[in-house]
Structures are given as structure tokens and as C-alpha cells.
Amino acid sequence: MTVNKYLKTFIPLVDALAATFGQNCEVVLHDLSNPKKSVVKIANGQITGRKLGSPITDLGLRLLEKGRNRTTSDALIGYRTRTPRGVELKSTTVLIRDSVGKVVGCLCINLDVTPYLTAKDFLEKMCRTSPIEEKGYESGYPEKFESNVDILINDLISQALKKVGKPPAYMDKGDKLQVIRDLKEKGIFSIRGSTKKVSKELNVALPTIYKYLEEV
């Protein structure tokens, strides 16, 4: 098969690109002087089922026509296509010109993205989370992983105080009951020593905390 001299330099590139991106990447070199049998070099042709001597595509013909009038870019990068078997491809086509600017061929790259779409779907499913309908978690994360229980207690108390929006010295009984109610809902009083810590933070006697707990 005779190949235009301007296209010969691209022949090694076909195999190089295919080897770089693997068997899911088809690389095709077209000689547009003979659209009926334009394929002069192909690697991984199993992706589209083409071989040497296969014809140019309909898009190739359109690009050839536009390229003659220079009404479009010489490169069409990353567009979506599909094979007759329904395989999704990410494709790129680059026009090749001779020394006087005439379009003589094109280099096409067709990447079978099926494995990547499958991986994308798997990763999206693995990363998908379900919201927990709990109030009081401004960050949207309802669980804290602490290595020190004192840090956990202090953080829960700080959140409860922040919701009231007043320093303990300015809180009335209703405010303090709100703090106790919030902390009880979060289960803080199941931790030994937490009641004493709450008592200190609210500046009330320990028996008063127990009384508040009975009230809520």
C-alpha cells in the first residue's frame, strides 16, 4: 500500500501511542487521498473492528471538507463516539497537512473508556454516604473519632454552649436546662466523670446537675 510521504513520518507514532496507552487505545492513520481505503496504519483495530484499507469515517469526511477551507481547527480533541457494538469511546482527530497546507491525512486516537466508566461507577458507589438526621452537627459529620475521652467531652460541651450563645455566667435556668438536654441527647452522661465536668463548665453544684437531668 502506497503511503503519502508526509504521512510516513507518523507511522511509528501509531504504534508508539498504542503501546503507551495500552490495548484499550486504537490509533489510526488515514490517507485522505483515497477515502474509500484511507486506513494505512492501525493499532488495536479490534476496538472499532477496522483494519488496513478500511474507509474514512463520516466525521473524517466533514473534517476534510472543512479543513480544505480552513474553517475549523486542525485538531478535534476528546469528543465522544460509539462503536457499532455500543462501546463508548473518547476520540481525538488531528489533520495532517503537506508543505503547502493541503490536508493529506489525519491521525485518530480512540480510547475505549468502558473500564474507566465502570471504575468511576464503582468509586461513586463506594464514596456515596447516607445523611443521618441528627441536629447539632454544623459540620455535617455526626461522628467524632477521638483518642482521648476528655477531648470528646470538652468538644460536646463546647457545642452545647455554642448553641445557647451565652457565656455560662449569663445563662438563666432555662438556658442551662437546654445545655443539659442537648448533652443528654448526645449521651455524654454515660461517660464517667462527665457530670462533674459539666457542673464545672456551667458553674453550678453537682446536685443541681442531677436535678436538671431529672427535669429534662
Image (tube, rainbow, N blue to C red):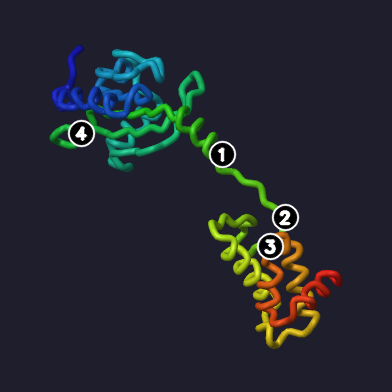
Residue 177 lies left or right of residue 13; in this view the side is right
Q: Position of residue 110 (x, y in %)?
A: 37, 28
Q: CA distance from mark 1 to mark 3?
A: 37 Å
- Disc ID at residue 126: 1
Q: CA distance from mark 3 to mark 4?
A: 80 Å
> Amino acid type of disc 1?
Met
| Secondary element type, mark 3 | loop
Q: Is residue 129 above or below residue 19?
A: below
In this rendering, the label closer to the viewer, 1 or 4: 1
Q: Can you identify the residue that label 4 sits on? A: 97
Q: Which quadrant is the C terminus positioned in?
A: bottom right
Residues packed near mark 2 inside 10 Å, few (<14), some (14 to 19) or many (20 plus)? few
Residue extending farthest to the right is 215
> Amino acid type of disc 3?
Arg
| Secondary element type, mark 1 | helix
> Amino acid type of disc 4?
Arg
Q: Is residue 152 above or below residue 174?
A: above
In-front residue for pair 7/61: 7
- Of pointers 1 and 3, the one earlier in the residue sequence: 1
Residue 6 lies left or right of residue 69; in this view the side is left
Q: CA distance from mark 1 to mark 4?
A: 47 Å
